[in-house]
Amino acid sequence: MRCCPADCATRNDWEKELQAEIENFQSGPFEEASDMLKVLGHPMRLQILMMLLNRDHCVCEIIYVLKEKQNLISYNLGILKEAGLIDSYYRSKHKIYKLNGDAAGFVRLLKANLIDRRAHT
């Protein structure tokens, strides 16, 4: 393991390696990942995602399960939708929410590695 090499030849290689690290960190995916983690940082939003992993739900079902006020549920659904994690559609006059196809795999991974694992310890 090297740290701040003193000789010039090694220092040049060291600087090249660190410059490559800097370039990696300046790319957009880190900002996107950080934004997504902020969205997932609220327990209610995680609970909603876990519900939608099982099947699509209307707002009244989510309210019933989570025992929260409609405006709070709707607010958090809006955040999840804006983040691209969920979609909605209408079934007669009821708005139904579902996991976005791209998000389903991520939510399953999250459930298996963080939520289910904690429940079994």
Image: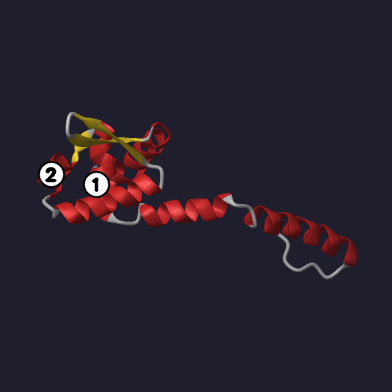
Please provide percent x and percent y for residue 97: 26, 37
Residue appearing at x 82%, y 57% in the figure: 13
Q: Which residue is mark 1?
A: 47
Image coordinates for residue 37, horizontal then vertical, percent: 42, 53
Q: Which mark is residue 78?
A: none
What residue is shown at x 75% (from left), y 69% (from top)?
Answer: 4
Mark found first going from the N terminus, 1 or 2: 1
In the rendered image, the residue lying farthest to the right is 9
Direction from residue 19 to residue 36 in the image, left or right: left
Q: Quadrant of the N terminus?
A: bottom right
Residue 32: x and y in percent read 51, 51
Amino acid carrying label 2: it is Val
Give the residue type that dot 1 points to: Gln
Q: Give the answer, above or below, for where 30 lies relative to 100.
A: below
> Relative to 107, is 9 on the left or the right?
right
Q: Which residue is mark 2?
A: 65
> On screen, 109 above or below 67?
above
Out of 118 and 48, give the one closest to the viewer: 48
Q: Is residue 106 visible?
A: yes
Local packing at callout 2 (Cα closer than 10 Å; few below 14, some 14-19, many 20+) is few
Q: In the rendered structure, are the residues bearing label 1 and label 2 in contact, judged by CB atoms less than 8 Å apart? A: yes
Residue at x 72% of width, y 66% of height: 3
Q: Nearer the viewer, residue 109 or 80?
A: 80
Q: Using the rendered image of the protein, determine whether residue 118 is visible from the camera's viewpoint.
A: no
Decide which of 43, 55 is in the foreground and name it.
55
**Mark 2, secondary structure of its residue:** helix
Q: x%, y% of residue 62?
A: 17, 43
Which residue is most to the front?
A: 93
Secondary structure state at the residue bearing disc 1:
helix
Give the camera-side residue of 35 and 96.
96
Q: Residue at left 38%, top 42%?
A: 85
**Image height check: is 9 above or below 87?**
below
